[in-house]
Structure formats: structure tokens, C-alpha cells
Image (tube, helix red, strand yellow):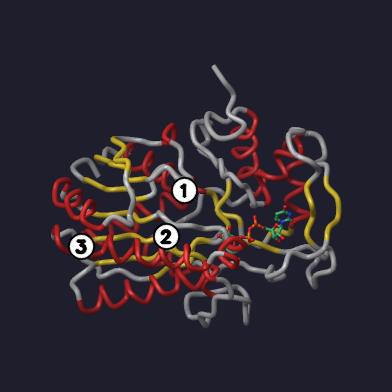
Amino acid sequence: MTSLKVLMVGGAGYIGSICARVFADAGATVWTLDDLSTGHEEAVTGELVHGSILERSFLIDLLKRLQPDAVMHFAARSLVGESVNHPLAYYDTNVRGTLNLLTAMQAAGVNRMVFSSTCAIYGPPRYLPIDEAHPIGPISPYGDSKEMIERILSDCRAREGFQITTLRYFNAAGAMPDGSLGEAHDPETHLIPLALDALLDRRPPLKLFGRDYDTRDGTCIRDYVHVLDLAEAHRLALARLLDGDPGASYNLGTERGTTVSEILNAIARVAGRPVPYKDAPRRPGDPPALFAASAKAREELGWRPAFTDIDDIIRTALAWAQTPRYGRYATKG
Ligand code: UFG
């Protein structure tokens, strides 16, 4: 990877920043393009280009100047609930932003992209585990925007000479094991950071959304996949594009479902004390169970998630949560 030049779009965010670090550690030259609306300057690896994917002419100039071998596209609005109330902002940033990026790439003769997609494009599961052949049917503007982008990308792959791989993440979790990078959303909506904040007494007890689902303990099942494993999938996906592959779509999950109660138990095991929580009604739109079939990523990309034990994922998340270097609870000094 030593002579490789990669532009990380949205590289100041949770997954993008960890991916940027992994690529830089492997010897790639990395630039981060981010508008810092939700990302953190402290999380950036390599040179930060402060700018927005909504500015097309700026993107064209940038891509022409940098001439990267590939673009990793993480930039998006990504709050499912918010997308229901503000759909236009989601379509604008996610869809128009991606169109701008593709147009700029084409103008600059840059044709490789790895795109951050989501299991939300499948909607409520018709069967489990969810493989790539599962019908597409998102139920939120966030999911819709990602599906629209995937359609655009597939046309660009087929007709415009792009090589593009889309990676459909399940529930990204965990932090850089050395404690340098982690999750710092504001607002935070995700289970593990909220549970850790409750454990660390800086938020009220976690609200456990629904105990009456048809699952083994009544709480929702999700497939938590470590961010470092997502970063590794990006590395493998790009290697395949560099080999001349046109690109494809892959589900990225551990293929193991974990319930909300099991997450709370894992945190209690790792931290040595229980997470304060209280039962709350179901959160609208939450499917009872979601977990991936990732055989395609394993077979075609050679992807092997290293973090298969939820306790190991929690351990890295806890270490980060105790001393976050940036974000609302950053520890000073
Ligand atoms: N949960 C709680 N209490 C909370 C927060 C979450 O009980 O305070 C529960 C949820 O009900 C759900 C589980 O924890 O059962 C996981 O919730 P998250 O919000 O952490 O994650 P989601 O599964 O809702 O979201 C993920 C991705 C989204 C993606 C979505 C698709 O983060 O980007 O899956 O369903 F769109």
C-alpha cells in the first residue's frame, strides 16, 4: 500500500477516521476531506482539507489537484430518526453530495470508490441472516438515500467506467484498541456509547427500548461489528479494485446476533459493575432482529473479522469512553 494515495471523504468521523489511520499505518498517503459538521479535527490522520461535498467546483479542483488512486466515501448524514423529520437534508447531503463527488472524480479521471452503505437499505428483514440477495426496502429517508446512491453507483460502474464497491455495514462498534480514536457523536443515539455513558454516570440510566420482542430474551438482536474490522474490509475492497475488479456490494457483519440485554451483560462483565438502565417502550422502526450473512465478503474479499467476541468489542469501546480524546466528554490534558 506504500505508494497508494487515498482521499478519505468524511474521514474525520467515527468509521472514516479509523479507516484513515489504518491506511496511513499501512503506508498509504491519506488526505481527509471533511466539513467538520459532525466529525472531529482531532481525529484526522494526514492532511485535513476542510470543505463540503456540496460544493461541486471545489471538489473538481481538489480531485484534479490531489489525483488520488481512490476515494473512500464515508460522508453522510446518518441519524435514522432525524432523517424521518428532515428528509430533504438527508437527500441533499447524501445523494447530491455523492453526485458531486462522482462528477468531480470523473472530471479528474479518478475512477475508484469504496462507499459506506448500510444494512438499513434492506428494511425489515424477510429472512435471517441477511445476505446481499435479500430484497431492498428501506423504511427511512436515511436508508432511502443510501439505496438511491447505490443505484447511482451501480449505473456509474456499468456505464461510466467507475470501479466501485459498496460496503453495507451492520452495527459499527468499538474503538481503536490503543484508545486514540473512537465514537463521539453529538447527539448520540447508539446503544453501546449510551450504555457506557450511563455506566460512567455522565448520562441518566440507559433506556432499554422494548423487552417484548420475539427474541431469545425479549430484546432486539443486532450484529455488532468492530470498526477496525470495517477498516480492514475497506483495505481488502480497494486491493480488489486495484486488481481490476469492477467492484460489488458486500454485507459486513460478524454473522452473530447479540441482544440488547446481552450487550448490557457484556459491559457489566468487562467493567465489573452493572449498567444503570430502565425499561422503556419500543423505539418506532426498530426491527426485532438484524444480522448479516457475510460469506460473500469472506469468499471474495478474504475478509475475516478479528473481533468475534462481543466482550473484546466492548473492551475497546470502554477504554475509549473512559478517556475520550475529543467530543463532548473529552478528557483534558
Ligand atoms: N437501544 C436501546 N436504547 C438506546 C439506544 C438503542 O435500547 O438508548 C437499542 C435499540 O432499540 C436497538 C439496539 O439498541 O435494538 C441498537 O440500536 P442502535 O441505535 O445502536 O443501532 P440501530 O440498530 O438502530 O442502528 C444501526 C445503525 C444505523 C442503521 C440501522 C439500521 O447505527 O446506521 O442500524 O437498522 F441505519
Q: Which amino acid type is marked by label 1?
A: Ile
Spatial CA distance of label 3 from label 1 is 22 Å
Q: Is mark 3 within 8 Å of ligand 1?
A: no
Q: Would you place residue 310 above or below residue 272 in this image?
A: below
Left or right: 328 as drawn, with respect to 227: right
- From the image, tell me which residue sits under label 3: 111
Residue placed under numbered mark 2 in the picture: 116
**Residue at image coords 14%, 46%:** 65
For the residues labelled 1 and 2, say whether their Cβ atoms are less than 8 Å apart: yes
Location of residue 137 by image quarter: bottom right
Q: Position of residue 227 (x, y in %)?
A: 50, 48
Instruction: Tell me if I can see residue 269 in this picture.
Output: no
Measured as percent of width and height from the top left, residue 9 is found at 34, 50
Q: Find disc 1 in the rendering and name its residue.
A: 15
Classify mark 2: residues with Cα within 10 Å, few (<14), some (14-19) or many (20+).
Answer: many
Sequence-first tag of 1 and 2: 1
State whether label 1 is within 8 Å of ligand 1.
no
Whether residue 133 is visible to the viewer of this picture, yes or no, is yes
Q: Residue at x 30, y 68 (%)?
A: 247
